Image: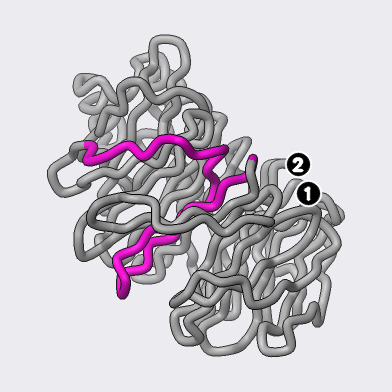
Amino acid sequence: MRTLTAVLMTCVMGSVAPAEVAGLGRADADRQPVTLQLIRTIPLPGVTGRFDHFAVDAKGHRLFVAALGNNTLEILDVAAGRRLQSIGGLHKPTGVLYLASSNRIAVANGNDGTIKTFDGGSYELLRSLRGLDDADNVRFDAQAGTIYVGYGSGALAILDAATLNLTGSIKLPAHPESFQLEARRPRIFVNLPDAKQIAVIDRRKQAITAAWPMKEFQANFPMALDEANHRLFIGCRQPARLVVLNTAAGKPVTDLAISGDTDDLFYDAARQRIYLSCGEGFLDVVAQGDADHYERIERIPTASGARTSFYSPALDRLWLAVPQRGRQSAEIRAYQPQ
């Protein structure tokens, strides 16, 4: 009964509607563990439209949230549970990157194709790099001091992290969605839903070295990597499945049902779990028994359209963006893994 009790408590706190509790079911509550405990809700009054990606300043306990539909970057103090700043004047902000060494924030903008860089102290605009149409996900290779940005009809832009200058581009057969960098090897795995594949890039050669087909399970948007076990986790929407691939062989390992409209997923290596945020209105938690065996162990009711999230191993928190819809106001929900 622990799960049902926890969900009922969040209803009292005003974070989960009673109707959502009814959908959980007593039998599910009895057999499911509590894996994510809702500990705080941070309101975002006046923010409308959908959200996209996040970044975190672990030392400063700041969360950076791309409010795509609102054309703002929302900056939150997650320790105090309050909004610090809202940076306006953006154009469909999508990917966000925080550079701790220089205390700068880089924001990709899909509509005007810019990477806007802001000072992390004053939040003043420092520069705008143009020419990256439909700029989207952003990743940082700390060892190489390189930033990668997915953009256009198919490319990864390569930026120097110190200067934020464009130094190169890797061509792709379709627009890139989520992508992940290996730390021990020079590979990048890129979701290409329009091409129904995953591209494997050698970032030293700046070229595609393999393409893994996604024919049975498509609309592959979010991705996470368990590099130690050579496993790649792919969230698909058509149908709603979590696909596990062997990165050594480039072959499927298994797949399992998940909630619909997933847009973010994260691997918690310490607990050997996968967290998926799904726009259908659930957070799914999948347990990794070993590298080849997985089971969904909890399906936590959230809110319709709440499909973007961020998990920080450094702060051991998962944050979920809930968009304004009807009587539901925009907010960020903070969960503590149990």
Residue bearing mark 1: 218
* Mark before the other along the chain sequence, 1 or 2: 1
Which residue corresponds to the image point at 65% horizontal and 64% vertical from the top-left?
Answer: 244
Give the image location of residue 59, x and y in percent: 21, 65
How packed mark 2 is, by other alpha carbons closer than 10 Å (few <14, some 14-19, many 20 or more), is few
Instruction: Name the image colouring.
Output: one colour
Towards the viewer: 213 or 98 = 98
Q: Residue furthest left?
A: 80
The amino acid pointed to by label 1 is Gln
Residue contact at pointers 1 and 2, CB within 8 angstroms: yes
Q: Is residue 85 magenta?
A: yes
Above or below residue 176? Residue 87 is above
Q: Secondary structure at mark 2?
A: strand
Name the chief secondary structure element in magenta.
strand
Which residue corresponds to the image point at 40% horizontal and 64% vertical from the top-left?
Answer: 268
Q: Quadrant of residue 181?
A: bottom right
Which span of residues is magenta-colored?
83-111
Residue bearing mark 2: 238
Q: Is residue 12 visible?
A: yes
Q: What's the distance in space between the residues labelled 1 and 2, CA to CA?
A: 5 Å
Towards the viewer: 43 or 117 = 117
Which quadrant is the N terminus positioned in?
top left
